[in-house]
Amino acid sequence: MARKKNITKDQLINWYMEFVLENNHQPKSVFSFAKENNFEESDFYKFYGSFEAIEEAIFSEFFHHTIKILHKSEEFENYDARNKLLIFYFTFFEILTANRSYVVYALEDSKKDIKKLKSLKNLRKQYTQFVEDLNIERIELKQETLEKIQNTSIKESSWMHLLITLKFWLDDTSPSFEKTDIFIEKSINARFDLMDIKPLKSIIDFGKFILKEKVNFY
C-alpha cells in the first residue's frame, strides 16, 4: 500500500492523541507510529523532532484555537483587560474540557508539581505574551528597572494563576466543572481588585502634595 503523502501537523496531532488515549503511553518509536498510520517516518520530522515536541505543540494548539475563537468576536477588542482575561479563561477551559481525557493523560504524573511540566513550555510563552498584550494598568514608576520587575511580576503571577486553575480543574468533579467556572470568576476578579492601582495612586498623589507643600504634622 502506498504511503500517505502531504501529511499535516493537525493529522500528526490527531493520530498521536488517539494513540496515547487508546494505549496510555507514547508510541514505541516514530518508525512504529508512522507505520501504524501509513506515512513515511521522514514526514514526521518535517514538523516535530520528537514526541515531546508534539506534546508541546498540542497545548500550543489549544491556546491558538482559543485566541482564534476570541478574535471572531467583534466585541472582544473593546473589552477591558479584566473581561478579556475572563473570556480567555472560560474559552480555554472549554477547549481543555473537550479534550479532557488527553489533558489528564498528559498532566496526570505532574499534578503535584505541574509548573515543571515540559509540555507546557510553549504555552507559558504564549500565555504570558497574551497577558502582556492586555496592557493591564500599572503604576508609573518612571524607572526602567522597576518597571521591568513590575511587568515580570504580573506575567509570572498570571502564569502561576493559570497553573493553579488548571490543577483545580483537574481535581474538579462537579457537573460540567461548574466549580471551576466559579473559581475562574472569583479568582480573576480578586486578582484585578488587588491590582487596582487607583487607591495607591491617590496615596502617592497625596504624598507628593505633602512633600510639595512641606506640611508639618508636628
Image (tube, helix red, strand yellow):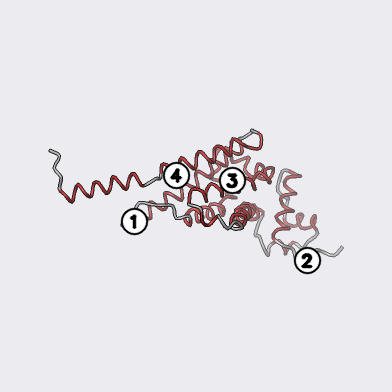
Q: Residue at x 34, y 56 (%)?
A: 145
Q: Nearer the viewer, mark 2 or mark 3?
A: 3
- Residue type at mark 3: give it: Phe
The secondary element bearing badge 4 is classed as helix
Q: Residue at x 33, y 58 (%)?
A: 144
Q: Residue furthest right?
A: 1
- Residue type at mark 2: give it: Lys
Q: Which mark is residue 90?
A: 3
Q: Position of residue 33 (x, y in %)?
A: 75, 55
Label 2 to label 4: alpha-carbon separation: 50 Å
- In the rendered image, the quadrant that contains the C terminus is top left
Q: Nearer the viewer, mark 1 or mark 4?
A: 4
- Indicate which disc, 1 or 4, sits on the residue closer to the N terminus: 1
Report crowding for label 2: few under 14, some 14 to 19, many 20 or more residues within 10 A (C-alpha). Answer: few
Q: Nearer the viewer, mark 2 or mark 1?
A: 1
Q: Which mark is residue 192?
A: 4
Residue with the mark numbered 1:
145
Q: Residue at x 76, y 58 (%)?
A: 34
Q: Position of residue 1 (x, y in %)?
A: 87, 62
- Residue type at mark 1: give it: Thr
Q: Which mark is residue 5?
A: 2
- Indicate which disc, 2 or 3, sits on the residue closer to the N terminus: 2
